[in-house]
Amino acid sequence: MTTDDTISAVARHLAQARRILFITGAGISADSGLPTYRGVGGLYDSDLTAEGLRIEEVLSGEVFALRPDLTWKYLIQIEENCRGAQPNAAHRAIALLGRHLERVMVFTQNVDGLHRAAGSADIIEIHGNLQALMCTVCDHEETADDMSGREIPPRCPACGGVLRPKVVLFGEALPEDELERFIIALQEGFDIVFSIGTSSVFPYIVQPVVYAASAGIPTVEINPARTQLTDIVDYYLPLGAAEAMTRILGELGMDVPENV
């Protein structure tokens, strides 16, 4: 099946769908200028940081508790790459579908907030949001769209405690309430499931797609690189997210808005 044939087939399924699940990773934000963190051109392709630690160690809850300055050094690198980024056609296409269908849920690994900025409403940010900060000592919370010029680690204006973003660091548990909401949505059912721009290394990313495929629900993977899901899904598109979603919606006669 050619790429054009695959796009047409996916569009036919989409035309019949009322409930869609999009599982997204860093690759969906690549066309917004953000690094994919893993893979070609990734922010963390090298084995060790300048401190001789793996990036997963530096960005762990354990290291943050001992050396918040070190963890924040690399959080700032991520924040700098996200700063000023705008939703691309893939984000906007998903948001557009959300305005026309019964339910369009986005389950994302991303902390860049671009799905929300594009207008999607039914979102589970399973790893949190980098722009939301909270104090590790008191109840203070704030939103920070730009960390330039801030003291590192940033301090709470109320008590002087160290602030942290409301993200899940390595070694920390995923938010139970969001996981429960996701499980309920899966039980209620979807008509088609997309995996877009994720390397599919975490079980909670892989299992919903495997479950859908085994239940006969159409499954689609959009990713320039093959993953462990590629041979499981019904349809694989080796394209960037923005191109793929624009072409799929084009088959349905829908134009993706140029702006949010």
Image: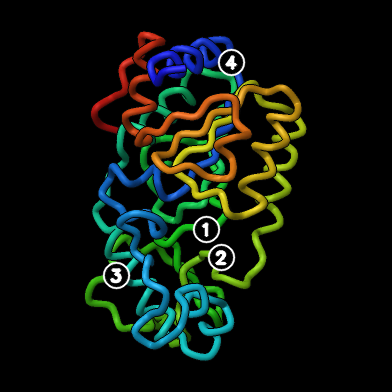
At 53% from the left edge and 91% from the top edge, which residue is drawn?
66
Give whichever of discs 2 and 3 has the lower sequence position: 3
| Near-viewer residue (160 or 229) | 229
Helix, strand or loop at label 2? It is loop
Residue 17's disc is 4
- Where's residue 171, x and y in %? 62, 72
Q: Residue furthest bottom?
A: 66
Q: Give the mark toward the camera: 2 or 3.
A: 2
Q: Amino acid at mark 2?
A: Val
Q: Amino acid at mark 4?
A: Ala
Helix, strand or loop at label 3? It is loop
Position of residue 254 in the picture relative to residue 159 (left or right)? left
Q: Are marks 1 and 2 in contact (CB under 8 Å)?
A: yes
Q: Residues within 10 Å of mark 4 (few under 14, many from 20)?
A: some
Q: Residues within 10 Å of mark 3 (few under 14, many from 20)?
A: some
Give whichever of discs 1 and 3 has the lower sequence position: 1
Residue corresponding to mark 1: 128
- Give the tally of numbered discs: 4
| Near-viewer residue (14 or 233) | 233
Q: Amino acid at mark 3?
A: Met
At 35% from the left edge and 46% from the top edge, which residue is drawn?
29
Q: Residues within 10 Å of mark 1 (few under 14, many from 20)?
A: many
- Where's residue 246, x and y in %? 33, 23
Residue corresponding to mark 3: 147
Q: Amino acid at mark 1?
A: Gly
